[in-house]
Image (cartoon, rainbow, N blue to C red):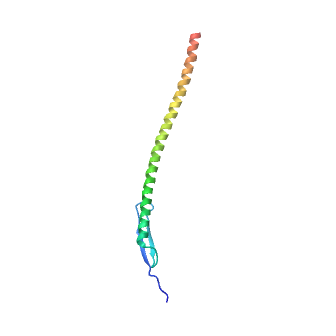
Amino acid sequence: MVRKNKQEKHQISYGENPFEQTIIFDRKLRGYSAEQVDDYVAELAKEYNRMYSELTNLKNEYLLLKTRNDFLENNVNAISDTLIRAEIIADEMAKSSRGIVNG
């Protein structure tokens, strides 16, 4: 006697993010507990959504810090250029004043 397993479809939907999916599982007579699988997958989805949110926040923070860093680097370069020009001018003024004093 051949026994046919009764199969049911079981659908699970998770989260609101770009990777949102609906997953359909086949249910079989002697499979894992559907409730335990659902609970485990729900925990995975919850953790995934938390990590996705954290990743988004970290990316935004990175972009903000990169912008600030670029701004500060530009300021450092401008100050450095200004100091170099001031040294050159001071040297020229010192040479010029020596010429006037000696002249």
The structure residue drawn at horizontal position 42% and vertical position 57%, both measured from the top left corner, is 50
Quadrant assignment, res 19: bottom left
Residue 90 coordinates in the image, percent (x, y) = 54, 21
Answer whether residue 103 is visible to the viewer in this image: no
Residue 92 coordinates in the image, percent (x, y) = 57, 20
Quadrant assignment, res 47: bottom left
- Residue lying farthest to the bottom in this orientation: 1
Closer to the camera in the image, 57 or 5: 5
Closer to the camera in the image, 17 or 9: 9
The structure residue drawn at horizontal position 56% and vertical position 21%, both measured from the top left corner, is 91
The structure residue drawn at horizontal position 47% and vertical position 47%, both measured from the top left corner, is 62
Q: Quadrant of the C terminus?
A: top right
- Where is 29 relative to 44, above or below? below
Q: Is residue 65 left or right of residue 94?
A: left
- Where is 90 relative to 27, above or below? above
Q: Is residue 80 left or right of residue 29?
A: right
Residue 31 coordinates in the image, percent (x, y) = 46, 76
- Total numbered labels: 0
Answer whether residue 10 is visible to the viewer in this image: yes
Quadrant assignment, res 34: bottom left
Residue 24 coordinates in the image, percent (x, y) = 44, 71
